[in-house]
Image (spheres, rainbow, N blue to C red):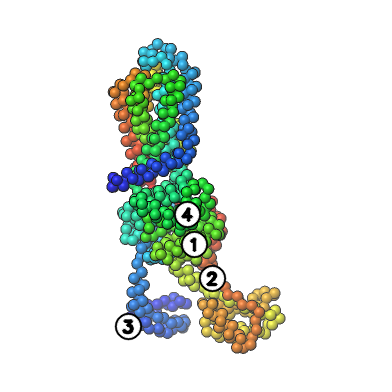
Amino acid sequence: MLEVKLECPKCKNQITIQVKPGEKILITCPKCKTQGTFTLPTEKSVQQESKKEDILIVEHLRKTFDKDILAVDNISFRVHKGEIFGFLGPNGAGKSTTIKILTTLLKKTSGKATIDGFDIDAQQAQVRRIIGYSSQDVGVDNDLTARENLLLQCQFHHIPKKKAKKKVGELLKTVKLIEAADRRLKTFSGGMRKRLDLASSLVSEPKILFLDEPTTGLDPQSRQDIWDYVIKLNRQGMTIFLTTQYMEEADHLANRLCIVDQGKIVAQGTPAELKAKIGTDKIKLLFKIDDVESCEKARKLLFKLPGIEAVGECGLGLVSENGLTIMTKNGSAMVVRVVRALDEEDISFEQLTLSVPTLDEVFLKLTGKTLDVIERKKAVKPVGRRR
Amino acid sequence: MNFMEMLSEIVAIFNRWNKKLVRQPILIFFNLIQPLVWFLLFTQAFSAIGDIPSFQLLTGTSSYVTFFTAAVIIQTITSSALSSGLGLVTDFDSGFMDKMRVAPISKSSILFGRLFSAALTTIIQVAIIIVIGFALGVTIASGMLGIIIIFILTALFGIAWSGISLFVALTTKNQETTLSVGLLTTFPLLFLSAAVMPLGLLPDWVQQVAKVNPFTYVAQAFQSLIINGFEWDKIEYALIAILIVGVSSLGASIMVFRKKIS
């Protein structure tokens, strides 16, 4: 038996319960009578959780420029080995500053960070041997050919010539640049350069790869190529830390992510967790425009259906539409049950749409602004880029 | 720091810059334009200086072109040194510098790779100047060995003077500042030295400045090799001046480069 302290989600009342690991119990809040269930994870699953090794540990990291510009404001997070970790936020949120601190390019003001156990300040040399970095600027030499660029990187990492040649050939193949290998970069497109830059950050077979806005400014096809490649690398076991200002990208790639704004982490978790935090999936049902009766019947029926949190009024507030909105935690599973329930009662409807919350909404909810607006506002003066 | 590793890093970066230069050979001539204009126009306009008796007495030659060759060589060296700094700024701008800094290589390797390549470029440029000098009737008293010593001094002074432009480049990371600081220091120093006029013909206050100006000693070494042959004490003085400039400018550059990451 273990004692566990819980907080009532509704009235924030502290509840202490006695529970066995693995046991699922029903709790009623003594104050507001809200009911819920709680399962204590078994010891085995607790262990599994902690078994996930952290490759990057960041604690209370701060960075100020010129004493009063706070670019990174006391952030803490951990990146597990083998995951893709995203850092999502608008321009000027401190993403690039953070990545530059972690890759030893910039000195932190205070706090602590270790990569695979090495301190990023005290053990810079060791850190540099195990990281790969692909900057926003695309750090490749335009006077050299693709092959020469990669060979140069190999030399920087002291890879013997023979091994380097072989490795460069392989890398050029993987990033689909083998035909253009001996052309100077002057003739390369933005996407090709980015792919080469990515390849060049991989010559040392890093344990963790840092990607600073890997697809900013790329066309959709090039973006897809980079995404595919990042996923492929991750499947081969590489840990990836990436920053992005695209919700879609974070959603698509990241196993877990931090949402950052003005140097602070405003939320962290898996994309699903973050979305769940702000709320609910919505199912919208539309009926024939003059079939008010069906709508009312459906409303009463669905209200009683378990798993449904709320059902809106009929009419949707619009004259041109006759329908209602249903709020639920698990939209995709509920759709089937909603349809079945309506079918059983012979209520016919015209259209059903399911909408799930996006990370955009999460961001809006957490910061009170949308990414787009901030982008335009801040793009003029990004705080603390290049120093 | 493993010496062999550092050597291979320097070679890698040295080769990178050489490749860039070979692919844009125009860069070799870019820095030569100004010294060449001087060489061709200045020496024509001021050729009468050679007729001044005390000029001949002080320098050992009546040919101003011959005397002035040293000044042109120095100008070539300094304007080429300027481009070392500019090259670094380009790397900062393109993001390539970050790529190098993230790699497990020494900061000094990044600088020395650049410096050695710049020194090689300068030797090629000075060789061109000497050939043009021959065409203008300049003779070199110390012969082939003297020319080799001129090349060695060129490389060393080029590296030492590059330190100044590296320092400005690393501190400001700005093309314009690097360029203007380079130009603003070079011109006055050239005229406040024994490069353009023998020390004895300069006004008193200029002589005082010239005596602490490293350009004077380097110029006198070149002048003696071109006009008189081997005067080892002059070469010695030049080496001491180069050493002082080099140690302080490169020391400061490396320090700034190591420190300036915040």
Instruction: Using the image, determine if residue A323 lies above or below residue A248.
Output: below
* Quadrant in which residue B50 is drawn: top left
Which residue is at the front of the view, A214 or A25? A214
Q: Which mark is residue A336?
A: none
Labels 4 and 1 in the same subunit: yes
Q: At label 1, which amino acid type do we have?
A: Trp
- Place of residue B234 in the rendered image (x, y in percent of width and height, measured from the top left): 31, 23
Label 2: element kind: loop
Q: At label 2, which amino acid type do we have?
A: Pro
Task: Identify residue for label 2.
Answer: A357
| In this view, the mark in front (1 or 2) | 1
* Quadrant in which residue A41 is drawn: bottom left
Labels 1 and 2 in the same subunit: yes
Would you say the residues marked 1 and 2 are in contact, meaning their CB atoms lie under 8 Å apart?
A: no
Chain of the residue under the numbered disc 1 shown in the image? A
Task: Identify residue for label 3.
Answer: A1
| In this view, the mark in front (2 or 4) | 4
Instruction: Using the image, determine if residue A9 lies above or below residue A216.
Output: below
Mark-to-mark CA distance, 2 and 4: 42 Å
Label 1: element kind: helix
Chain of the residue under the numbered disc 2 shown in the image? A
- What residue lies at 47% left-to-right and 40% top-to-bottom? B23
